[in-house]
Structures are given as C-alpha cells and as structure tokens.
Amino acid sequence: MKKAKNNVRKRDMKAYWYILPWLLGFAILQLYPFVSSFIYSFANYSVGSKPEFIGLCNYEKLFTQDKEFWNSLKVTLQFALYTVPGKLILALAVAMFLNREIKGINFIRTVYYIPSLFGGSVAIAILWRLMFLDNGVINAMLSRLGLPNVQFLGDTRYALKTICALEIWQFGSSMVMFLAALKQVPKSLYEAAEIDGAGKIRKFFSITFPQISPIIFFNLLNQTIQALQNFTSASVITEGGPLKATNVLGLKLYKEGFAYFKMGYASSISWVVFTVIVSFTLIIFGTSKLWVHYADE
C-alpha cells in the first residue's frame, strides 16, 4: 500500500515538472504584471522612480479632470459598436454562402479566410493606411469613376469608420466557426420546414439561428473583448487622429505609459479597460439565457 502511494506521488511530481514551464510563464508574464498594475494604479509611478502611494488620485484625475479619457472611452465604445455587429453579420452571411456544395468551394473558403491570417499585423495596417491616403488607391479609384476624393484619414467623419473597416475585413475566423456550426444543423429540420411551407426567412429564425446560437454567443463574446482592446489599427493607421477621433483607450494607455512614462496613471487606465470588458462580458452572459439554445435543453 505504501509503495503504491509512493508511486502515485512520483507520478504526480513528474506531472508538476511537465507543467512547470507553463506555471513559470503564467506567474512571470501574466500574474505578476496583473497584480503589479493593480498596485501601481494607486501610486504615482514613473519608469526608474520609486512608486509613491497616492490612493485613488489617479482614478479621481481620470474621471474628473481628464477630458481625453472620456473621449477615448466614447471612441472605444463606438469602435466596438461598429465592428462587432458588422464582423458577425458579414461572417455569418459569407458562411451561409459557403455552406453549399459547388465546384471549387474549398478554394473559395480558403480565399475568404486569408484576411484573418494577416489582418491583425502591423504590415497590413500600414498597407491599409497607404490605400486610404489622399493620394492612395481608393481615392485613385474614386477619381477614375468621376467622384470627388475623400479624406478617409484626415476627416473626423471617416477616420474611425476607416479603421473599423479593417477590423470588419478580418471576419475569417468567425466565418470558419459559423461554417462549422451550419454544417451541424440537421437537414431534416429544413426538410420538415419546407413541407410546412416555411420560407427562407422563417427557416433562418426558427431553425438556423437557434441551432447555431452557441457559436454566435462565442463569437460575440470574443469579438467584443477584442474590439474593446483595440490598439494596432488606431496606432498605425491614424495615430489617434484626427483631433483624437480614433484615440481608443488602448492607444491612450500606451501613450500615458510609454510616451509620457506615467506608469501609475496608465495602470489605472488599464484597470478601467478591464472593468469595461468584464461589464460587457457579464451583460452578454446574463442575456444569453434569453436567446442561446443548447442541444440538451
């Protein structure tokens, strides 16, 4: 009996050794920065200086004195409002189109997925910026059509929508999951609906939507979290301009921490971003019971 217990302990120790690299990475790269940022958010801390505890002063300044913060919060929420529904609707529409057995469909699916492989990179963001410059490809096309040029990046009316277009263009990952979900919907349900005389719209809302609602929920949650953390496109394409029209919270956080070296203040912004993300996550989870349907229910 004692020998068996010793063998179990040795086996457990081997398991701990196997997961030790992950535990170290988690502790050093995630847990430590997470806890440190919370502590620094209550301190006056700059790179190279000793943190000075100041209580809630950073948060007080953020909410009562920093007008730029409220603008960034507004821009971030607008960005999420534009991109999340736009990406999900486009991804679902394309998935439904690709959920057919036609010649060359596998190649077509690959082509639609490619933007998601490169869309989040800095290189693609730079390319997007070049395309939408005043003398870029898009304005050149408009000129050929006899239309006036548009200041996509220099006009506050279009700048945010331009970077939103890049985010929506990266719909491939959501599309693949929607496509997988659509293939799991029993064809017998559609056949029965056709016998009852149901049209395409009725079949979508009565069969397709309930059957794939768990994937819609998953994509909605993931895309909302990503949108609220946006940084790359706003930084590379517009640098927060014009007139702070694209200065999302992620970009403001970066500027405060790595341009102005106000790490304590930047930490307080990061915790506001975290709170906003948690709030939206709880709202999505709370409302999911009203529209998400699982197979075992």
Image (cartoon, rainbow, N blue to C red):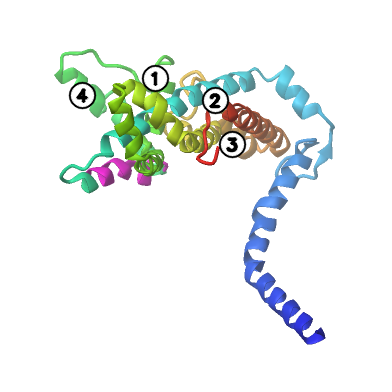
Q: Choose mark 3 or mark 2, whichever is in front.
A: 2
Do the residues under discs 3 and 2 have CB atoms within 8 angstroms?
no
Instruction: Give the main secondary structure, helix, strand or loop, of the magenta stretch.
Output: helix
How many C-alpha atoms fall within 10 Å of the one at disc 1: few (<14), some, or many (≥20)? some
Q: How far across and how far down the image is residue 267, in percent?
A: 70, 37
**Distance in Å between CA atoms under marks 2 and 4:** 30 Å
Measured in 3D between alpha carbons, the distance from the residue under mark 3 to the one under mark 2, in whole angstroms, is 14 Å
The three-letter amino acid code for the residue at tag 1 is Gly
Using the rendered view, name the quadrant where residue 160 is placed.
top left
Q: Nearer the viewer, residue 186 or 29?
A: 186
Q: Which residue is mark 2?
A: 76
The dot on residue 154 is 1
Give me the C-alpha separation between circle 3 and circle 4: 34 Å
Q: Who is closer to the viewer here, 244 or 287?
A: 287
Q: Which amino acid type is marked by label 3? A: Tyr
Check residue 254 in the rendering and tell me which mark sits there, or answer none: 3
Assign the C terminus to one quadrant of the image. Answer: top right
- Which quadrant is home to the N terminus? bottom right
x, y percentage for residue 222? 52, 38
Q: Who's the residue at 27% across and 38% down the image?
A: 98
The magenta-colored residue range is 108-120
Q: In the shown orientation, is residue 187 left or right of residue 217?
A: left
Drawn side of residue 100 relative to residue 264, left or right: left
Q: Which residue is mark 4?
A: 140
160 vs 9: above or below: above
Question: Which of disc 4 and disc 3 is earlier in sequence?
Answer: 4
